[in-house]
Image: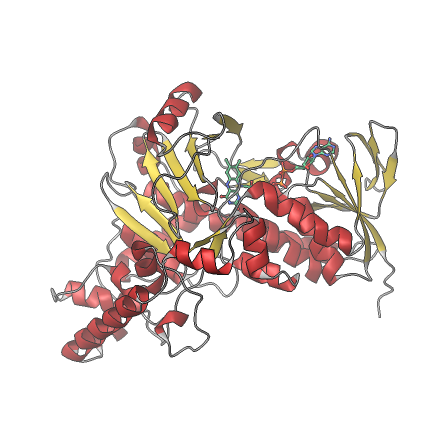
Amino acid sequence: MLAQTSLNVVVVGGGTAGWMTAAALAKLLPNACNIHLVESEEIGIVGVGEATLPHIRSFNERLGIREAEFMARTRATFKLGIDFENWGRIGDRYIHPFGTFGRGQGEVDFHQYWLRMLHEGRPVDELERYSMACMMARLGKFALPSQDPADVTSTFNYAYQFDATLYAPFLRSIAEGLGAKRTEGRIVDVELDGETGNIRAVKLSSGERIEGDLFIDCSGFVALLIGKALNEPFQDWSKWLPCDRAVAMPCRTETAVTPYTGVIAMEAGWRWRIPLQHRTGNGYVHSSAFIDEQSATDALVAAVEGEKIAEPRVLRFKAGRRERSWVKNCVAIGLASGFLEPLESTSIYLIQAAITALLELFPEKDIADADRDEFNRVIDLEYDRIRDFLILHYHATERTDSEFWNYTRTMVIPDSLAEKLELFRRRGRVVKYREGVFLEASWIAVYLGQRIYPEDHDLRADLPNPDALQKGMESFKGEVIIAAESMPDHLGMIAQYCPMAA
Ligand SMILES: Cc1cc2nc3c(=O)[nH]c(=O)nc-3n(C[C@H](O)[C@H](O)[C@H](O)COP(=O)(O)OP(=O)(O)OC[C@H]3O[C@@H](n4cnc5c(N)ncnc54)[C@H](O)[C@@H]3O)c2cc1C
């Protein structure tokens, strides 16, 4: 047995990353650590990040959070996927759904049969008609999924759209209830051990000094510990993901409270629309190399649907990640570890992935290299895969109407993505992962939604009798539409299940 004493864990930062980490450690490793979180209200949090991936549900469940209470407290709505407008060409529209196309069972993916029908010139409907999540989204419906795999309503998943400024306080109450300590104050210095290079303590402007065994850097873009104190290099990915600004502006909701996030391609980036219970979040993510902040702000203001609730606010960032997220006795989680723009709502997922890896590899006082290396391997993998998935959205376009799209359409992409594209172009094959985010349906939705059509299909899809196959597909499509139509409206479901306090 390895000797395990309780570690003093100092969490620097009280945004979504800081409080998710503190709550998870307090709940799931109560005997292994004493948690002390430091945050500065004067500095504040980034305060955006309203759309999530389905994985957040299991995070909340592990913390024993009741879904309806969480949704009411964070004024959340349901999210079945992302609706992409104008990406492949102006006028194009497709949904990246949370869930499968077809039943999602069997050796051969459903889209292979769909491709076969297409290649044989047989009548076949748009792919989204064979997806429960897509059809619910299109009809503005929502009900919780069935647990019975035979039921068509078990074939979708869901996430949330919530008020990012309310999630951290919600988690704070949980973490503090479990014994996490919090200190309010601005850190002005970081003390390193001259011999080991480990962080020994952080010093506050009040003069207070907080010592620790393990430091979690959740300080946001400033990366106070991993970047400033430990000088871990940042891998800059902006040549592939050139968006480096977002102008954000919430407004009153004038149109539908959709159970999906809208992302609309613009002249030099894209615009988000995220409807919550009390307002709609909007933002224009753009590249400063192709549009100036004022023009981007004007374009956003002109596009939003309702009266503005706050003045437009510009956020600046760079796509990329730290070479290593765990260095010495410091683990960076959240924006301190890296940032990939919010197109596929992956930041909170990355926080969760880092917390999961930290829980699994939680160290002894003398941190083993093997634990650190494994953590960094897992996090690198997550970042790299998400990076490729995001680049695909920009690269797979036929748009020629602006310098921005001309750049992304013709840029040299990473080999890892070029290989995936080649695989799909030949026979619609998708690289399968055993772990991580964005499984087959996600890649298929984006490839086909952005006009990457394979030349051929999986040979095994030729096996079934074509008439029987066509009949089966028609029947499944019917099941989907009947099930979707019989569900409550999204807003009706929220009113009954998780209304926010008046
Ligand atoms: C434009 C934009 C849109 C986004 N949209 C999404 C989305 O839809 N979905 C998604 O998952 N993610 C999204 N994100 C990312 C998401 O906002 C972040 O991942 C999330 O908020 C976590 O931030 P954080 O906790 O790492 O940093 P922050 O929220 O910045 O928190 C940093 C903390 O560190 C503290 N701190 C900093 N310096 C000091 C100091 N010197 N002393 C003491 N305390 C200090 C601050 O006070 C604060 O408490 C978006 C990000 C941007 C920029």
Q: Residue at x 26, y 66 (%)?
A: 481
- Decide if residue 123 is on the left or right side of residue 187: left
From this viewpoint, is residue 348 visible? Answer: yes
* Foreground residue among 251 and 146: 251
From this viewpoint, is residue 231 visible? Answer: no
Q: Residue at x 74, y 54 (%)?
A: 369
Q: Position of residue 246 (x, y in %)?
A: 47, 31
Quadrant occupied by the N terminus: bottom right
- Decide if residue 51 is on the left or right side of residue 263: right
* Foreground residue among 148 and 361: 148
| Vertical position of residue 370 compared to residue 233: above or below | below
| Vertical position of residue 127 compared to residue 283: above or below | below
Quarter occupied by residue 240: top left
- Decide if residue 197 is on the left or right side of residue 246: right
Q: Position of residue 144 (x, y in %)?
A: 45, 66
Q: Position of residue 53 (x, y in %)?
A: 49, 54
Q: Position of residue 7 (x, y in %)?
A: 84, 54
* Foreground residue among 434 and 483: 483
Quarter occupied by residue 254: top left
